[in-house]
Image: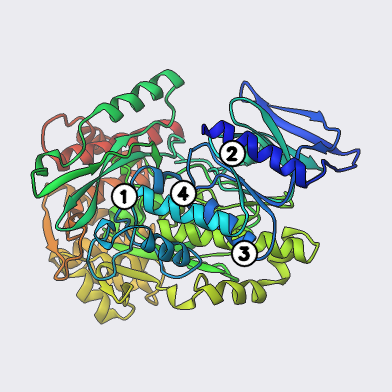
């Protein structure tokens, strides 16, 4: 039976058991987009279908949100543009997914996936601390079983087209499966579709990079069978952000038509299992929520109160043009060389509630964390936690007959109790900064950051000063500026790294040493982690203070440094370090021009 036929039969079945629902309000409006512009009209209040919770987008977060709400006894309808539940992580064969924190309702779904097929068809890395993941068939069938168990009604191959609102309260949505439009009233709507509902309402987003507004990078995966396990192989497919429709479609088809990655490794012992292709966005524009928690807040030592789950991840937006990113991200990834470390982020209820909108929740990468921080919350298990949290908030909103704002303000302890029972909320998942090469049980080793003069000296004297530098940026050592200025009087890497630390603090006493670094030319040092986890790109960290010096000199923006930057920016050779330095110099010169 065709999917559209299934959807149509489902609609008929619901109409037999449910009378058409009406909502009487002179304020009821229907909102949509026409040619990307918002259009609003009055609405009669008559709906085809009714439910307690409508989840738009049955992806990684949305599917778990639906199960969480239905498990608490509420009627749930989900719709998704894909033909199955689970989103890109399921449909696009995203296997061997890395990092994220353990615990939650998703573990029950995974236990069901365990029973779907033989263990040797399970995709597992076999490494300590690795996160279990599943083939498309396993995970989608497990989700379907849970949908059936809790009587969740699903529309597949369907898109949200309209949102219904009464003043600031969302009352339902309209969806279309290509043949018909169905209107659905709901007591709470969960947007698990990367902000699709929020865009129809015209809600504010937090934007992309400050430099160019980009906010998305795409990748795809394939699976190979090797040694009795299914292992994922992935590759980046570039940026679609900013591309027009024709260009995006052409790029999409070109990437789909290319041979699978790692093809040279395939033989009779290592066989291609499946080519799952779907455009997977590593990040999406975040919605402005009741509480916005940005990476700049984290670096300034601000941690949100009332977290209901924790994420664990590297800052993983993986954009190659770091020179084009925000200074906060550069502080972490370039100046502090923290690519091999992860960070725990506490997520609060208000980070899931769009600003000023009642009875609407967001669940997925578009929660209120901003462009940089969203790359630290996007791990699969963490997004499943996000869905569970949204589903429970929706259920409590209905049970208390109150607003989503009230649940976020006054029911934190109850929320934590419910989410704690499943393992979704677990204070032990608040790991701080973790070494991603050093698994400890089912998580990663928390790092001790240098805070004393002796500890800071030891870190900054080495070819791997990452923890010392990020400790300085976080403001942990007392009188850090004074300590670092004292280190400038000494030689070698301690002097250079101390200058970088002062640059992180925007202390101009570092400028003479930065000039010395540039005058001395490119020098690099390779640090290899003594503990090697499964991802080789994390094993080695290269220290190159020349590139860092260019970045910092550009930030200070002194007019007498312009000729130096122009010379560096003019480089057009093959040296990768000088090429990268030239990119930072050109970005700095653009800033000079804007200020002029």
Which numbered dot is residue 86?
A: 4
Relative to 529, 363 lies left or right? right
Q: CA distance from mark 1 to mark 4?
A: 43 Å
Q: Tell me the residue that label 1 is attached to.
A: 552
Quadrant of the rendered image containing residue 118: bottom left
Q: Tell me the residue that label 3 is attached to.
A: 71
Name the residue rendered at 72%, 59% in the picture: 404
Quadrant of the rendered image containing residue 496: bottom left
Frontmost of labels 2 and 3 is 3
| Category of crowding for the residue at label 2, using alpha-carbon neighbours closer than 10 angstroms: few (below 14), some (14–19), many (at least 20) | some
In the rendered image, the quadrant that contains the C terminus is top left
Percent across and percent down for residue 242 are: 44, 28
Q: Tell me the residue that label 2 is attached to.
A: 196
Kind of element beneath mark 3: helix
Q: CA distance from mark 1 to mark 2?
A: 39 Å
Relative to 66, 394 lies left or right? right
Q: CA distance from mark 2 to mark 3?
A: 25 Å
Percent across and percent down for residue 284 are: 48, 42
Q: CA distance from mark 2 to mark 4?
A: 17 Å
Q: Nearer the viewer, residue 37 or 10?
A: 10
Whether label 2 touches label 3, CB < 8 Å: no
Relative to 284, 238 lies left or right? left
Frontmost of labels 1 and 2 is 2
| Category of crowding for the residue at label 4, using alpha-carbon neighbours closer than 10 angstroms: few (below 14), some (14–19), many (at least 20) | many
């Amino acid at each position: 039976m065709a999917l559209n036929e299934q959807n149509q039969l489902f609609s008929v079945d619901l109409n037999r058991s449910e009378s058409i629902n009406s909502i009487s309000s002179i304020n009821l409006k229907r909102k949509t987009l026409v040619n990307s512009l918002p259009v609003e009209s009055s609405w009669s209040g008559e709906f085809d279908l009714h439910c307690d919770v409508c989840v738009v987008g049955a992806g990684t977060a949305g599917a778990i949100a639906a199960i969480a709400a239905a498990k608490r006894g509420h009627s749930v309808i989900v719709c998704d543009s894909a033909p199955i539940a689970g989103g890109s992580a399921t449909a696009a064969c995203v296997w061997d997914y890395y990092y994220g924190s353990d615990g939650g309702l998703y573990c029950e779904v995974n236990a069901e996936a365990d029973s779907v097929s033989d263990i040797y068809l399970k995709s597992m890395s076999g490494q300590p601390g690795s996160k279990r993941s599943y083939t498309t068939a396993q995970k989608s069938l497990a989700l379907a079983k849970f949908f059936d168990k809790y009587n969740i009604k699903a529309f597949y191959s369907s898109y949200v087209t309209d949102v219904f609102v009464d003043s600031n309260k969302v009352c339902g949505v309209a969806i279309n499966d290509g043949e018909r439009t169905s209107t659905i009233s709901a007591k709470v709507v969960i947007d698990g579709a990367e902000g699709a509902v929020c865009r129809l309402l015209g809600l504010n987003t937090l934007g992309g990079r400050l430099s160019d507004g980009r906010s998305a990078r795409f990748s795809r995966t394939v699976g190979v069978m090797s040694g009795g396990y299914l292992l994922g192989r992935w590759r980046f497919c570039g940026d679609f952000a900013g591309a027009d429709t024709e260009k995006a479609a052409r790029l999409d088809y070109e990437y789909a038509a290319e041979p699978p990655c790692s093809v040279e490794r395939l033989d009779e012992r290592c066989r291609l299992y499946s080519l799952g292709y779907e455009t997977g966005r590593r990040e999406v524009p975040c919605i402005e929520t009741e509480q916005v928690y940005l990476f700049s807040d984290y670096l300034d030592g601000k941690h949100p109160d009332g977290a209901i789950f924790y994420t664990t991840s590297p800052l993983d937006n993986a954009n190659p043009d770091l020179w084009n990113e925000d200074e906060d991200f550069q502080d972490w990834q370039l100046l502090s060389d923290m690519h091999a470390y992860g960070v725990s982020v506490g997520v609060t209820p208000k980070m899931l509630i769009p600003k000023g909108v009642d009875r609407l929740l967001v669940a997925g990468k578009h929660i209120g964390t901003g462009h940089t921080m969203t790359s630290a919350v996007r791990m699969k298990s963490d997004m499943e936690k996000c869905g569970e949290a949204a589903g429970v908030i929706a259920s409590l909103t209905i049970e208390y007959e109150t607003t989503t704002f009230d649940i976020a303000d006054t029911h934190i302890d109850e929320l934590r109790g419910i989410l704690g029972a499943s393992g979704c909320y677990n204070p032990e998942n608040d790991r701080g900064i973790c070494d991603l090469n050093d698994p400890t049980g089912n998580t990663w080793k928390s790092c001790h950051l240098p805070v004393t003069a002796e500890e800071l000296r030891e870190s900054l004297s080495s070819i791997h000063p990452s923890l010392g530098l990020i400790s300085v940026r976080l403001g942990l050592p007392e009188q850090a500026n004074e300590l670092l200025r004292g280190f400038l009087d000494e030689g070698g890497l301690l002097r250079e790294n101390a200058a970088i630390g002062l640059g992180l603090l925007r202390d101009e006493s570092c400028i003479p040493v930065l000039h010395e670094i540039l005058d001395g030319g490119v020098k690099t040092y390779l640090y290899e982690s003594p503990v090697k986890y499964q991802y080789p790109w994390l094993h080695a960290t290269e220290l190159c203070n020349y590139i860092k010096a260019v970045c910092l000199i550009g930030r200070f923006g002194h007019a007498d440094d312009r000729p130096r930057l122009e010379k560096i920016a003019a480089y057009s050779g093959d040296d990768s370090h000088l090429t990268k330095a030239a990119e930072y110099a050109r970005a700095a010169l653009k800033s000079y021009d804007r200020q002029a």
